[in-house]
Image: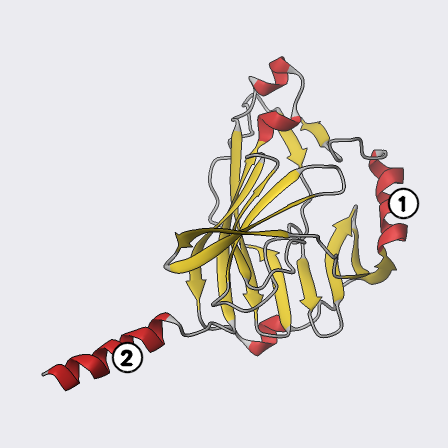
Amino acid sequence: MRKYFSVAFLFAITITHAQTKQGTIVYERKIDVHRRMEDEQMKAMVPQFRTDKHELLFNKNVSVYKSVEEEEAPDPFDNGGGNRLMIRFGGPGDDGVLYKNFSNQKTLQQTSLGDKEYIIDDTIRTQQWKLADETKTILNHSCKKATTKTERGRDIVAWYAEDIPVPAGPENFGGLPGAILLLDANNGEIVFTATEIKNDVSTKDLKEPASGKHITRVDFEKKVDEAFGPADSKGRRIITRDN
């Protein structure tokens, strides 16, 4: 009996510490819409929070981040009467895919502007993370805490799982000793929470995006500025009415 217990115990340890080197992470992104509005009347017209889903497909060399299409549901930003308030937040992967190659530090972001599709050629952004000893469990993965600041001075808090040894995460966040399973940007303004982790991924889903004209990020930003005006200290907020 004692020998059997020892074998079973060692087997349980092996499973607990097994690493996930490829798979799919599904995130819920929750945006506090009111944090980006100064007009109180406009705040009264829309719900405070907006949620959607994204997924991160990965192996040890490559990741692909994209939005998840959900079933049609009433739009909480439609105030009736034929007027619909359109608010665009424009994160990477919202209207295409964000491809990262960790071997050569290359990124390709598929996106659209007007009726044209583009592929933005860039490199993976280097983020100066400060690692901490704090831990928390997310989806049965023990995660460690890391913090940094964006170029605009926004606080970022991430929780990453070392047993998923891939430097990936939602949108452009990553570069940690494990995949990010929870990320808080600007004290609750945007929160990404992993809701599901699957250990399988198809190789065909990890290919570079091919649809769109290749362009540098500098040239693409110029086109966006021409179309919508330059971003301010809070980023670029595009608010229109669809009558």
Marks 2 and 1 sit apart, C-alpha to C-alpha, by: 58 Å
Q: Amino acid at mark 1?
A: Lys
Quadrant of res 152: top right
Relative placement, left or right, of 4 versus 163 is: left
**Residue at the (57%, 34%) spot, across then down:** 187
The residue indicated by pointer 1 is 222
The picture places residue 237, in percent across and down from the top left corner, at: 72, 32
User: Which residue ends up furthest to the bottom in the rendered image?
Assistant: 3
Q: Looking at the rendering, in which quadrant would you find the N terminus? A: bottom left
- Nearer the observer: mark 2 or 1; the answer is 2
Q: Determine the residue located farthest toward the top in the rendered image.
A: 41
Q: Position of residue 104 (x, y in %)?
A: 76, 73
Residue toward you, 204 or 121: 121
Report the residue at 44% width, 62% height from top.
Answer: 197
* Disc 2 residue type (three-letter): Leu
- Outermost residue toward the left in this view: 1
Packing grade of label 1 (10 A; few <14, some 14-19, many >=20) is few
Q: How many marks?
A: 2
Tell me which residue sits at (59%, 19%) in the image: 43
Dot 2 and dot 1 residues touching (CB under 8 Å): no
Q: Quadrant of the C terminus?
A: top right
**Residue pointed to by mark 2:** 10
Q: Is residue 214 above or below residue 218?
A: below
Front position in the image: 187 or 122: 187
